[in-house]
């Protein structure tokens, strides 16, 4: 089993900054993609940013230029620095990892998606 633990959410004024962090632990052989999704009330979960083990990044248009995703492959952690926050950024933010697990029989053949419990980000106007 794999666990993702998030930290760094909170309340911030518009124009402010937050840094979200996520640490993966457990029976991990490798992690391909790590990233952040968010879900606002009444809306579907959407990708905010993702990063591959090779460092390739993807950003939602809504956060491009205001956010930076980074990753430590050795520590299995991913962080999201968000600047110039807007009230529209208010949501629950979820960490995601696509993981190949270790087992007594060796590495798993396939990746499985794991999610954190979510951390609330509230941006006040």
Image (cartoon, rainbow, N blue to C red):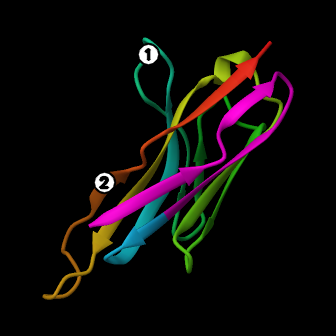
What kind of secondary structure does the magenta stretch mostly adopt? Answer: strand
Residue at the location (56% across, 80% down)? 74
| Image-based side of 116 in relation to 82, left or right | left
| 116 is higher (above) or lower (below) than 97 | above
User: Where is residue 123 drawn, in percent x and y?
Assistant: 72, 22
User: Where is residue 89 drawn, in percent x and y?
Assistant: 66, 24
> Picture quarter containing residue 14?
top right
Label 1, on which residue?
Answer: 43
User: Where is residue 4 drawn, in percent x and y?
Assistant: 43, 58
User: Where is residue 118 drawn, in percent x and y?
Assistant: 47, 40
| Start-end of magenta stretch | 1-23
Badge 1: few (under 14), some or many (20 or more) residues near its Cα, within 10 Å? Answer: few
Residue at the location (71% across, 36% down)? 64
Label 2, on which residue?
Answer: 113
**Residue with the most extreme right position:** 15
Local SS, label 1? loop
Lower sequence index among marks 1 and 2: 1
């Amino acid at each position: 089993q794999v666990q993702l633990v998030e930290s760094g959410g909170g309340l911030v004024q518009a124009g402010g900054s937050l840094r979200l962090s996520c640490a993966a632990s457990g029976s991990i052989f490798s992690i391909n993609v790590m990233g952040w999704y968010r879900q606002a009330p009444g809306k579907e979960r959407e990708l905010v940013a993702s990063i591959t083990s090779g460092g390739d990044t993807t950003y939602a248009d809504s956060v491009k230029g205001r956010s930076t995703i980074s990753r430590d492959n050795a520590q299995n952690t991913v962080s999201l620095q968000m600047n110039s926050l807007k009230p529209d950024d208010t949501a629950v933010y979820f960490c995601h990892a696509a993981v190949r697990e270790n087992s007594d029989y060796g590495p798993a053949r396939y990746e499985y998606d794991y999610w954190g419990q979510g951390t609330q980000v509230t941006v006040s106007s």
